[in-house]
Amino acid sequence: RALEADLKNALHNHEFEMFYQAKLDSQSVEIIGMEALIRWHHPNLGLVEPVDFISIAEDTGLIIPIGKWVIETACRQNMQWLKNGNRLLPIAVNLSPKQFNDERLLDDILKILSETQMPAEYLVVEITERVVVEDAVNANKVLRALKELGVGLAIDDLGVGYSSFSSLEIFPVDSVKIDRSFIHGLPENQSNSAITEAIINMADRLGLNVIAEGVETIEQLEFLRKYQCPQLQGFYFNKPMPADEFEKYLNNSK
Ligand code: G
Ligand code: G
Ligand code: MN
Ligand code: NA
């Protein structure tokens, strides 16, 4: 497939770029961290979204070098913002289950932290429940080692896909991200509201942080504040943006 062939050269040709989206405190609306999201500038097709190439990267094994580049770029960028006079904030990267099949993942992360000198406490990894299904043993080993170092762990897209809460018991989880499909119908949709409220309560009882993703409207914001969801992310506040734009946004919000 053409896209697959192009993807093979994309790293070498510097066609990837990281975008950044803020995570905010729901009460103060202060920026408390960010998520790094990959974008592919295809030479002919223009901007290709991750949904259109991550699965190809996974099937071809390219997710290993690409994933490494993602972590490295995010950490280096975060330290650059610090050097430029910003407060150091936790930065989250998305890890594919396939990255846990590579036994070098832990060493790669250690090396990146040491080379960029970013303290481990400022790295967060976001994984989906797919990790449980695809390779729980190695994933657990790596995630426990990361936890020891102080790296944060967030369960992404909670409640969709494999829809199991077992990841919360198996892994050393710090936060859960309520999938945006549940946030979408707030506050009118009764099941969306009930599920959102239930996840917030469950996380509170488990001592976990909660982030609502995909917050787009003031009504959703008000609902989430009312039910005391501590952290928010979504287009209502900002879209994922290139590093230089994100830096301006950080500066403006100081
Ligand atoms: O950025 P966007 O909303 O288009 O992301 C769509 C999907 O792609 C999300 O599920 C997100 O987790 C995933 N994604 C974005 N960036 C990365 C990345 O760097 N690595 C992996 N594995 N997935 C990513
Ligand atoms: O699955 P994950 O949470 O990693 O996906 C992140 C993706 O969600 C990013 O690609 C980002 O573009 C997208 N996203 C972030 N905020 C919003 C939002 O408010 N609405 C929608 N529809 N998508 C969002
Ligand atoms: Mn994510
Ligand atoms: Na998500």
Image: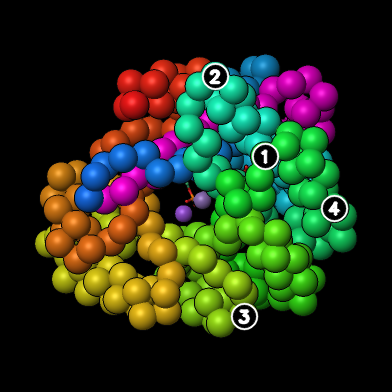
Q: Which residue is pictured at 45% across the width and 43% down the height? A: 33
Separation (CA) of disc 2 from disc 1? 15 Å
Identify the residue under disc 2: 84
Counting from the top left corner in percent of width and height, residue 204 is at 34, 74
Provide the residue span drawn in magenta: 1-26
Identify the residue under disc 3: 170
**Mark 2 or mark 3, earlier in chain:** 2
Separation (CA) of disc 4 from disc 2? 28 Å
Identify the residue under disc 1: 118
Question: Helix, strand or loop at disc 3?
Answer: helix
- Tag 3: residue type? Ile
Q: Quadrant of residue 32?
A: top left
Q: Quadrant of residue 129?
A: bottom right
Separation (CA) of disc 3 from disc 4? 22 Å
Counting from the top left corner in percent of width and height, residue 79 is at 62, 30
Separation (CA) of disc 3 from disc 1? 27 Å
- Tag 1: residue type? Met
Image depth: mark 2 or mark 3 in front:
2
Q: Is residue 183 left or right of residue 223?
A: right
Question: Helix, strand or loop at disc 4?
Answer: helix
Q: Quadrant of residue 50?
A: top right
Q: Residues within 10 Å of mark 1 (few under 14, many from 20)?
A: some
Counting from the top left corner in percent of width and height, residue 222 is at 14, 53
Q: Which residue is pictured at 16% across the width and 71% down the height? A: 190
**Mark 3 or mark 4, earlier in chain:** 4
- Tag 2: residue type? Asn
Question: Helix, strand or loop at disc 2?
Answer: loop
Question: Helix, strand or loop at disc 1?
Answer: loop
Identify the residue under disc 4: 107
**Mark 4 or mark 2, earlier in chain:** 2
